[in-house]
Image (cartoon, helix red, strand yellow):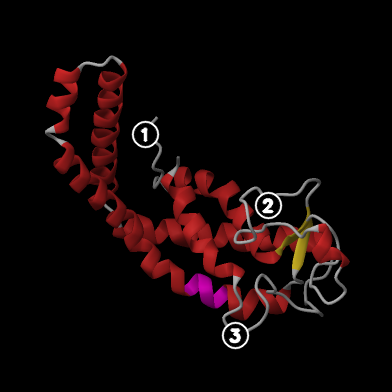
Amino acid sequence: MDFNFILLFIESIPLQFDIFGGERMALGSDDPIVKGLIASMFAVSGFGILLNIFNSGVRKKMVDQVKLKRIMKETRAWQKERMAAMRAKDQAKVAELGKKSSYMNKMSMEMMQMNMRPMMITFVPLILIFYLVLPQLFSYTVALSPIPLNVIPGDMFQLTCTAEQAADVDHVCTEENALYLWAWYFLSSIAFSGIIMRLTKTSMDLS
């Protein structure tokens, strides 16, 4: 799995909650400045692109990309070789590779720290923009999905409104499968992050 997706997932978790005491996933305005689904979709996507560019810029300054890719290449090669030995039931090879486990774990931890360090800088601007700017500009839901996108069991990570929520007159959802403001931002960020990371040469893709 792309580590950048994991970082975006971690960053998006707090965006579901109103830190000022409102209802969960109820970030938005009853009378937004930007009106209409089309305008909202493009505008939120624009914010996602700009924040991705900012994230990549911080990442380029703070992370040694040559060292990071060397560690990634080394750990992936070791994991691949170890899995191949386990499938072939080559116990001698497994034991030999196992001797490097502590070193590889250390390298994996260093790689994680290198990836997490920029997030400590970018997280604060993201939160400030998301809680103080976007709710004034946009409605609670800013796009429509043809299908439900709540693929994770439970209601911890809901991207789209359910039929029950849409039927509740007191809920912010007015239509089934409408995408929450934070959810459309999350999906837009994922869609453009890979392109932006390649353009800024901060991609974690070794291919």
Name the N-terminal-most of marks 2 and 3.
3
Say which residue appears at 12% left-offset and 25% top-offset: 96
| Main SS category, magenta section | helix
Left or right: 175 with respect to 122? right
Q: Quadrant of the N terminus?
A: top left
Q: Quadrant of the C terminus?
A: top left
The magenta region covers 125-129
Q: Residues within 10 Å of mark 3 (few under 14, many from 20)?
A: few
Three-letter amino acid code at disc 3? Phe
Depth order, front residue of 154/83: 154
Does 135 sit above or below residue 108? Answer: below
Left or right: 172 with respect to 204? right
User: Badge 3 is on which residue?
Assistant: 20
Depth order, front residue of 55/171: 171
- Asked which quadrant contains residue 22, the reply is bottom right
How far is disc 1 from disc 3 in space, using C-alphas?
A: 42 Å
Q: Residues within 10 Å of mark 1 (few under 14, many from 20)?
A: few
Three-letter amino acid code at disc 2? Asn
What number is the disc on residue 93?
A: none
Three-letter amino acid code at disc 1? Leu
Left or right: 17 with respect to 89? right
User: Badge 2 is on which residue?
Assistant: 150
Helix, strand or loop at label 3? It is: loop
